[in-house]
Amino acid sequence: MTIVHPLIGMVVLTLLVAIRLLYFAINSTLTGKVHIKQFRIYDGEFPKYFQSARQHYKNMFEMPILFYILCILLIINNNYTQFDVILAWGFVLFRVLHSLARIPNRDVNLRFGLFTGSFIMLVIGWINFSLKIL
């Protein structure tokens, strides 16, 4: 297994979150809960489920960016081990679980714990990479 596999897994998760947001946007417009003009600058009231889905999508471009950069650097340098792959899969697993917990807006403590798990995987990955190249 290579570092590319968890990278692809994270991309798939991001695309699924985007599809969910797109579905909610179309549904909100077709049911009249949101007027299409509101999407220009996200002006006016949006249903809570749409706001949550939008925030979830935005989150996919925050901390995961550091994951993508790390994976790409490991690939470019051809300098990854099984430990790096395990950390990468750990990050993806925590992000998937976080997404599953976020969808119904479950307990914030659960989401925070899952977020923290992915954060720890990423920090260890970056420390490990940094030690290899220094």
Image (cartoon, rainbow, N blue to C red):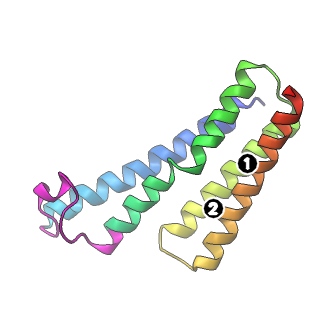
Magenta span contains residue 63: no
The quarter in which the N terminus is drawn is: top right
Name the image quarter holding the C terminus.
Answer: top right
Q: Secondary structure at mark 2?
A: helix
Instruction: Give the label, 2 or 1, closer to the camera.
Output: 1
- Picture quarter containing residue 84? top right
Answer left or right for 119 relative to 49: right
Residue toward you, 13 or 76: 76
Magenta stretch secondary structure, dominant: loop
Q: Position of residue 90 (x, y in %)?
A: 75, 50
Q: Which of the 4 image quadrants contains residue 78? A: top right
Q: Position of residue 14 (x, y in %)?
A: 49, 46
Residue placed under numbered mark 1 in the picture? 122
- The residue that disc 2 covers is 97
Tag 1: residue type?
Answer: Leu
Q: Earlier in the sequence, mark 2 or mark 1?
A: 2
> Magenta span covers which residues?
32-49
Disc on res. 59: none
Q: Is residue 74 left or right of residue 83?
A: left
Q: Is residue 33 left or right of residue 96?
A: left
User: Residue shown at 16%/60% (left/top)?
Assistant: 29
The residue tagged with tag 1: helix, strand or loop? helix
Rendered position, 72 above or below 119: above
